[in-house]
Amino acid sequence: MPKLIKLLFAAFIVSFMASVPISQAAGTGKVVGGEQHRAPDWFKETFLDFKEDASEAAAEGKHVMIFFDLTGCPYCARMMAESVEPQRALIEPYFNSIAIDIKGAREVSTDGENQMTETQLAKKMAIRFTPTIVFLDENAKPVFRINGFWNPAQFRIALKYVRTKAYKKMNISAFAKLQKAAPVYKLKDHQLLTKVTDFSKIKTPLLVLFEDETCSACAELHESVLNRKAVLNELQKFTFVRLNPRKDTAIIDPEGNKTTSAKWAEKLGIRLSPTFVSFDEGKERQRVDGTLYSHHFSAILAYVSGKHYKKYPTWLGYLRVFSKNILQSGKNVDLSKDGVSAKQ
């Protein structure tokens, strides 16, 4: 069976385009920034019985890697082009890879008995980002999950983490530290970063950026996303701070506990750099540990700063409103890497 061509138009988010039916009246913006991609030919075509797939993979000394995809996902296209296809030699010998369309109608089974559609599976597994990659062990149990785009260096760590079964002994953050990665990034300044260390006294929403010198994705983050006008406008509503998860900088967390940046990062379960964790009214509201472009990142910030979490359980629900408002203002929603929500 030939691989389905993924015609992209909705981005990394699983339910955006289908949920924003906006007529293209005069003065209404458009959703732009789509691409095209397809699953590699070396991905497996199976009967989508994950229990059987996992058993067959284990017999070959492999894990199953499920790539949850979406028609309309530039992050998926980038993940395939940069992190998956070029690293076939690190994937194919150790993983049986299967593509799942989170809006698809093919029948899938996770236990060898009960059937559901790809769409129902995505809902059951709470797939809120595409791509989402889930690795299964020999019992078809998820052992590790990637939400969103990870660049090649980050993805290589994840592949080794699963291939060596290090997930049985430690989390990926501890595993990454053991790899003794060389510094690849000099921490960049940002006009809105502050040096507050007592987070318990902050009255505004709080946004914490965890990053360190081994971060292979941080330079791009600062050079593009964090300098976009839409993002800057939302960042101004936060107390924006940076912490190094590998250092013991003394801080007081939002609950008033004295701790260090490293200990707090461990408590929060920070998996890699960069990771953003947002807080409001003393509680964590949303985090991002994969690559987001400016449109979705500014939507997440607005979701927290505007306290929309009180109405919408997840930021995806609010994303529809956020995007609709932009379109109705006559501006385009640009989902691409360089998206700026420009006027038509």
Image (spheres, helix red, strand yellow):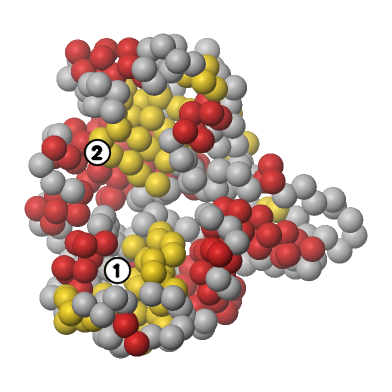
Count residues near mark 2 (Cα–Cα under 10 Å), then give few for <14, some for 14-19, many for 20+.
Answer: some
Which badge, 1 or 2, is on the more N-terminal residue?
2
What kind of element bears circle 1? strand
Q: Nearer the viewer, residue 202 or 86?
A: 202
Query: Which residue is the site of mark 1?
Result: 210
Q: Position of residue 48 (x, y in %)?
A: 43, 16
Q: Position of residue 174 (x, y in %)?
A: 14, 53
Picture quadrant of residue 51: top left
Q: Please name the residue shown 66% across and 55% down the image.
A: 320
- Kindly identify the amino acid type of the residue bearing the numbered disc 2: Leu
Q: Nearer the viewer, residue 33 or 147?
A: 147
Q: Please name the residue shown 29% across and 23% down the image.
A: 140
Q: Nearer the viewer, mark 1 or mark 2?
A: 1
Question: Which of the numbered marks, if any, corresponds to residue 159?
Answer: 2
Please tell me whether residue 39 is drawn above or below residue 111 in the rendered image. Answer: below
Q: Please name the residue shown 44% across and 64% down the image.
A: 285
Picture quadrant of residue 189: bottom left
What kind of element bears circle 2? helix
